[in-house]
Structure formats: C-alpha cells, structure tokens
Amino acid sequence: MDAIRQARIERLQQNMAAKDVDALLILTAGDYVYFIGDLRRQPRAIIPRQGRPILLTFAAEAEEARQATGLDDVRPYRGLHEMMLAIMAFFKSLDKEKPKVAIEMEFATPAFLMERFKLANPRVQVVDSKPLVAPLRQIKGAEEVALIRKAAELADLGIERARQVIRAGITEAEVALEVEYAVRKAGADRLGFPMFVNSGRRSLWLHGAATPKVIERGDLIVVDIGPVYQGYHADICRTFSVGEPSAQAQELYRLYHEMQRTALAAARPGVALHQIEGQIEKVLAGAGYAEHFIRGFMHGVGLGFEETPFPTIFPEDVLAPLAAGMTLAVGHTTLAVPGIGGVRIEDTVHLTAEGPVYLTQAPREAIIVV
C-alpha cells in the first residue's frame, strides 16, 4: 500500500477513534479507490479502528487483489453467505457487546446488501460514514486534482464532439452515442451518469437523458457530460442552439453566465454555499426571474459525480464553509422558463486559497450550430 493511502487510513482511524467507531465497511467504489487504491467491480473491505485493511474478495480474484493492493489479509468468498460469514467473524473477534460499524449511506450502497448485513449482524450498530470520510475526501491532493483535470479534458472533448454532430434531424440518442464513443476512445473509464441531451421542451428538465427525440431547428439543447478517468469524475454542461436563438433565449444565456460568474467570484475558502446562493438569487431577482431560482447551484465532484458538499441531497451542506482543496461543479441547476426553454453552463473547478481555477475549458458562450 502506498504512503498516500496509508496516510488517509491513519486519518480515518483517528476520526473513528474520536467517534467511537470500530470499523468502516466499504461497499462502494469511491471509498475503495480512495483508501485501498484499486478499481474493482464489487469492492468490499473492512478498515478497523486499528491495524491494516481487510479485503473481502471473490475467490478467483484473491491473489490478483493481494498483488494489486499490497495487502496481506485477503479473505476469499464464493458467494454472499461466505462474505457475510467473514464479516460476522470479524465483528465477533472484536469481543464487544455492540460494535459500531460505519457504512456509506448514499447512492452507490446496495440496499439489499445493507439489509442482509443488518439481518446477519443484529447486535452491530450501523452508522453513516459521512462524518468520518467526507472531511478527508472533499479535500483533494495534487495527485487527485491531476486525475480530475484529465477527466475535465475528456469533458471538453465531449462538448466539442457534441458541437460537431448536433444538427436538425439527428436524435438525442445519436448525439450521446457519438459523444460517449469519443470520450471512451480518448481514455475515459466510463460516464459517471447517463448523459443528458435535452432538446426543445426537454431543455426545461432539471435532470435528463438522451432519447429517440429528433432535434429540430430552433431547439435549445442542454448537454451534460460526466467522464470518469481512473475513478475520478469531471462534470460539464453546455447549451446549444440549432439556428440563431431567440432574443429571450439569449437573455437567459446571458443571465446564466452572470449567475456562474457571480458564484465563482464569491467562492472562497470560509464562505458557505448558502451565502453564494444568496448572491445568485439576487442576480435572478434583479432580472425579474426570481421565481425560477433553484437551489443547489454547486456541489462537490471527485470520486463521485456528486459528493460533499452535496446540498441537493443533504441540505445541511449549504451551511458548511468551503475549503481550499475542494473540487466543485458550478452550474448544477437549469434556468428553465416555459415558453422560452432551459439553459445551463456547468464547469468543474478547483478551489485554491486565492479562489477557483477552471478545470473544464470548453467555450462558455452560446454554441450555435446550423
């Protein structure tokens, strides 16, 4: 195990000791990459309060996992029941009446596995791992920023490919296929979420997909891409127009530019997200669009395409101050006005002591295709 991950584990174990947690049970790829340093389809590991991690690995992968991680305690299994027996044996070895285990309670944790764990270990207290892990993962080291920067380069490439292929008559799904092929061929592991190609009335959507809908002249098209490189994500969104956009659509685009610039000007270490959102809300109110403000303009990005600070899922995150070393997606919400359309400009930035630095570089002006 390399020195970087050993240091991360030691900081985690300090947090575990402070909160009287006996172990972190890893069931998600993000935590596995962060602490173990390996990309694996079904990541399973235990990090005890003291000592080295324990890997739980499909039997045929055990030797390969041992070599990839440098860890000696690799416990093989051939089925879910054997994996549960290994976990139960670990907690029994602690010789505690009610041991406490932390588990990530977000998108990627399989609900069935959590329920089966509780059934198999009724005396174990399960707590959310966020207070232990998020303070570590939200501050990115130089090696992490380099990987996110590479993912951002792939995101820029994806936007350029979208510009090349979007036209009247092509379907949203065809655009997504061309873009994903381009970023995968250039080195992306995958996309972190299904790509948005929201055209016409669908540009009003906050979230999206790529459907068989045919793109038409006059459409606004919101394209949101999240390439993943060696486990790390970038997040980018741009709005396209097939033909010259209407004067009203151009005004929305101008407003979104101002919203993003306002957010970036306010984003400094020590400033809380709710303070930044207050400034964005004033921009919209001043233009007469206050009723179209949506909270959740910024979120963290890294080993997850959305991670701490994560105000769209955890409203309390708007209260925590930003810190140097965070990577953030700025421009998460759609400015959607029925009868006109929706626009969004989203970039991935790295927050330094002096302020945010763009990692995504694709042009931010309205992208008009003919």
Image: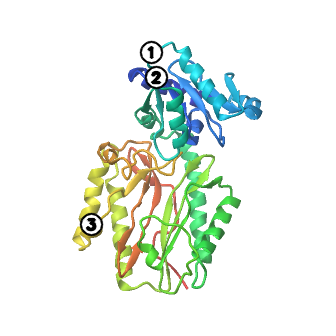
- Residue at disc 1, secondary structure: loop
Q: Earlier in the sequence, mark 1 or mark 3?
A: 1
The relative height of residue 341 versus residue 15 in the rendered view (above or below) is: below
Decide if residue 28 is in sight here. Answer: yes
Q: Distance from label 1 to label 3 (Cα)?
A: 56 Å
Above-or-below relation of 18 to 255: above
Label 2: few (<14), some (14–19) or many (≥20) C-alpha neighbours in 10 Å: some
Q: Residues within 10 Å of mark 3 (few under 14, many from 20)?
A: some
Residue 11 seen in this snapshot = no
CA separation in Å, label 3 and label 2: 53 Å
Q: Name the residue carrying label 1.
A: 97
Which residue shows up at 32% across the image and 58% down it? 295
Three-letter amino acid code at the position of disc 2: Arg
Choose mark 3 or mark 2, whichever is in front. Answer: 2
Pointer 1 with pointer 3, Cβ within 8 A = no
Q: Position of residue 218 (x, y in %)?
A: 47, 86
| Residue extending farthest top | 95
Note whether 361 is above or below 323 in the view shown.
below
Amino acid at pointer 3: Val
Q: Are marks 2 and 1 in contact (CB under 8 Å)?
A: yes
Along the viewing direction, whichever of 78 and 281 lies nearer the viewer: 78
Closest to the observer, 108 or 119: 119
Chain-order first, disc 3 or disc 2:
2
* Residue at image location 58% in from the left, 76% down from the top: 212
Dot 2: element = loop
Residue 283 tag number? 3
Q: Amino acid at mark 1?
A: Glu
Q: Nearer the viewer, mark 1 or mark 3?
A: 1
Which quarter of the image is occupied by the N terminus? top right
